[in-house]
Each structure stands twice: as C-alpha cells, then as structure tokens.
Image (cartoon, helix red, strand yellow):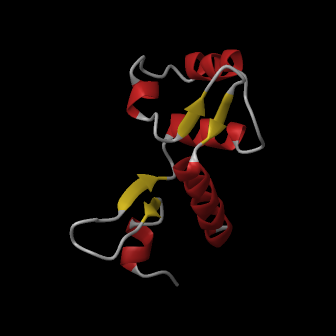
Amino acid sequence: MKTYNDFINEAKISYKRKYTESFPSKNAYSNTKVKAKLIEAIADGVMTNEEFDKILKELNANKRWVSRNSHIFKMNEEGVTLSKIGKRMYEKSKSTKEINE
C-alpha cells in the first residue's frame, strides 16, 4: 500500500536536480494537459510548426504558453523537437506512469 506522501506527490516529477541549496530542484507535474500532450507527440522525433500550432489550438492553450515553456522545446525552420530538459521530462513522466500502472 502506498503511503500518504506517495499518494500526494505521484504527479510531481523532478526533472532538474542539483544537491546544493543555491540550485534547488525544478519540478513539473505530469498531469498538465498541454505539456503532457505536446511532449508525448514530439517524443518520437520532429513535429512541424503547423502540427504544433494545431495541437495548441485544439487544447485551447494560452497565447503566452509557448514563450513561458520555451525551455522544453527547440523551435527552428525544420520543426519542433524536445530540448534536453524536455527529454528529461518525457523520460521521468514515462517512468512515473509505468510505476503507477
């Protein structure tokens, strides 16, 4: 049986970790609607800019969402890929889903 703390923090993913007080860990939540959908869609490879915009419109994302979460994606003329942090978030969320299932 899971403990109470495991139950509360099951959606919390620590994707950046340094072990000093001046560099605290960064956390993300695996059940965020827009971020989870985009990370799963891009994880396979490169997504075109049109597909990226289409998914954002389908999920009714705020116009500023992309600029606030620009550290997750690399955008260029060829398309959109996951950055180093985005890949970490995908791997952590994938392992968390496997544990919960």
Determine whether, in the image, residue 101 is placed left or right of residue 7.
right
- Dividing the picture into quadrants, the one containing residue 5 is bottom left
- Looking at the image, the residue that sits furthest to the bottom is 1
Nearer to the camera, 23 or 34? 23
Q: Between 34 and 4, which is closer to the camera in this rendering? A: 34
Give left or right: position of 87 versus 24.
right
Give the residue at the far right of this rendering: 44
Q: Quadrant of the C terminus?
A: bottom right
Give whichever of 22, 40 is nearer the camera: 22
Residue 57, given in percent of the width and then of the height, sits at 57, 16
Q: Residue lying farthest front? A: 77
**View extreme (left): residue:** 22
Q: Position of residue 61 (x, y in %)?
A: 48, 22
* Left or right position of 11 against 68: right
Q: Who's the residue at 46% across and 34% down the image? A: 70
Residue 74 against residue 101 in the figure, above or below: above
Q: Residue at x 78, y 43 (%)?
A: 44
Q: Residue at x 56, y 37 (%)?
A: 73
Check the image and report above or below for 69 versus 52.
Answer: below
Q: Is residue 56 above or below residue 82?
A: above
Q: Is residue 85 left or right of residue 91?
A: left
